[in-house]
């Protein structure tokens, strides 16, 4: 009977060991069952439940230690996986953080639309900067070309002035020298001219070509056809033709509405005033203010004095004083083409001026 009990106990112990191996967490529960059974058994006898309980307690301690060792080994085995998991999480966090930083630095904390706008603005600034640089270079090239043209113009003006002086044959000599010539006239005759301002045009092919005036047959009277403009303004218009190239136009003299006289072309050069008579005539432009084209009294008086001197210097009578209208039919000067009596009176006034100065025609 005792042998059966011992066999049963051993079998049970083997089952317990198997169960412990299968599920270590059931050890405590089984141990409590065995302890309760040992308490209920009779104490003091060897081989009884009490003795078995002692041996079971020792064995239980061994099992506990083995269970603890198994649990510790399992925990140690699980820790590297946890560490790996933590390191992978940290790596993912670092990657996500770096991506955010890259996105933030690329977009500067803005959304994609604002980033595109910023990029467009930067491109526009770059294009504007390039255009400004190109414009500056073009301006420099233009200024360089302009300076070269100015230098060439000055050189050509100097050459033309030399030619003009050759045509003019002006010699600065004393008035008493009978051989002195000024603008194609003797110095004695030239000295008697009325007061005027000598302001010659720059030699150019549009207003002062520098070609010689070999003879003077007639003297033409014109009007500026631009009411209210002064003699200086009309002289400036003649001067600008060398640059504008709009027309070939000029005159030997311009009389302002205040009576001032400006000489634009020397008397021994042609002026572009009467197309078919430029090579044998002298032309006078007169300023005016009135709507009908009539001259002021100051303009009229200066015109009479100038005509009287010119007819005397070139030995002409008043019949050689002509209107632009008399050669080509152009209504110039318009007042004297519409008032013939005024034109007849002008010629008489010229004759009277010559008589009063001691020169009888």
Image (tube, helix red, strand yellow):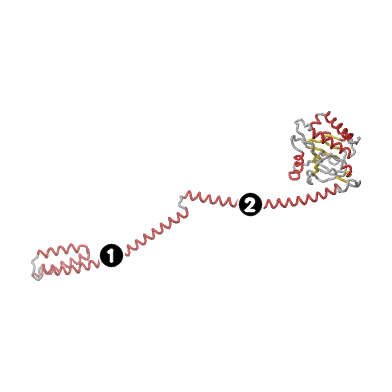
In the rendered image, which quarter is residue 85 located in?
bottom left
The residue shown at (26%, 66%) is 72
Quadrant of the drawing holding the N terminus: bottom left
Q: Is 358 placed above or below 28 here?
A: above
Tell which circle, 1 or 2, labels the residue nearer the N-terminal end. 1
The residue under the point 48% across, 49% down is 114
Q: Position of residue 70 (x, y in %)?
A: 25, 67
Let me know if residue 259 appears in the view. yes
Q: Is residue 204 above or below residue 52?
A: above
Local crowd size for mark 2, using a 10 Å CA cut-off: few (<14), some (14–19), many (≥20): few
- Inspect this view and state whether residue 331 appears: no
Viewer-nearest residue: 94 or 334? 334
Q: What x and y, as percent, mark residue 284?
A: 82, 38
Instruction: Pinpoint residue 267: horizontal percent, then vertical percent.
Output: 84, 43
Give the structural element (helix, strand or loop) at label 2: helix
In this view of the protein, which residue sits in the foreground, 28 or 360? 360
Which residue is painted at 86% across and 32% down in the image? Answer: 349
Please name whichever residue, 210 or 47, is drawn nearer the observer in this view of the structure: 210
The residue indicated by pointer 2 is: 136
Give the distance between the C-alpha atoms of the residues marked 1 and 2, in whole angstroms.
79 Å
- Labels 1 & 2 near each other (Cβ < 8 A): no
Checking the image for residue 75, the label placed there is: 1
Q: Which of 286 and 142 is in front in this view?
A: 286
Numbered disc 1: secondary structure: helix
Q: Residue 52 sits in which quadrant?
A: bottom left
- Res. 85 mark: none
Tell me the quarter of the image containing the C terminus. top right
């Amino acid at each position: 009977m005792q042998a059966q009990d011992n066999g049963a106990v051993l079998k049970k112990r083997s089952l317990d060991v198997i169960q412990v191996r299968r599920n270590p967490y059931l050890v405590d529960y089984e141990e409590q069952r065995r302890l309760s059974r040992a308490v209920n058994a009779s104490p003091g006898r060897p081989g009884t439940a009490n003795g078995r309980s002692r041996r079971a307690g020792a064995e239980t301690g061994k099992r506990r230690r083995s269970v603890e060792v198994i649990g510790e080994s399992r925990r140690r085995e699980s820790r590297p996986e946890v560490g790996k998991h933590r390191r992978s999480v940290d790596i993912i966090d670092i990657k996500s953080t770096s991506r955010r930083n890259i996105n933030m630095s690329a977009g500067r904390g803005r959304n994609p639309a604002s980033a595109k706008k910023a990029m467009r603005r930067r491109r526009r600034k770059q294009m504007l900067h390039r255009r400004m640089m190109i414009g500056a270079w073009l301006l420099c090239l233009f200024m360089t070309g302009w300076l070269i043209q100015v230098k060439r113009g000055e050189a050509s003006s100097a050459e033309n002035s030399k030619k003009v002086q050759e045509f003019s044959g002006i010699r600065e000599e004393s008035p008493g020298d009978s051989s002195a010539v000024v603008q194609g006239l003797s110095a004695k005759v030239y000295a008697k001219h009325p007061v005027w301002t000598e302001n010659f045009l720059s030699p150019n092919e549009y207003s002062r070509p520098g070609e010689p005036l070999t003879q003077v047959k007639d003297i033409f009277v014109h009007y500026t056809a631009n009411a209210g403009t002064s003699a200086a303004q009309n002289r400036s218009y003649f001067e600008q033709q060398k640059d504008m190239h709009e027309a070939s136009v000029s005159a030997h003299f311009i009389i302002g509405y205040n009576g001032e006289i400006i000489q634009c072309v020397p008397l021994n050069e042609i002026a572009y005033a009467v197309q078919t008579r430029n090579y044998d005539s002298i032309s006078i432009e007169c300023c005016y203010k009135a709507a009908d084209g009539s001259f002021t009294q100051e303009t009229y008086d200066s015109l009479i004095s100038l005509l009287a001197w010119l007819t005397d210097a070139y030995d002409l009578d008043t019949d050689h004083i002509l209107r632009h209208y008399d050669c080509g039919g152009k209504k110039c000067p318009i007042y004297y083409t519409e008032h013939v009596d005024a034109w007849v009176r002008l010629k008489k006034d010229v004759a009277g001026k010559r008589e009063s100065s001691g020169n009888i025609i």
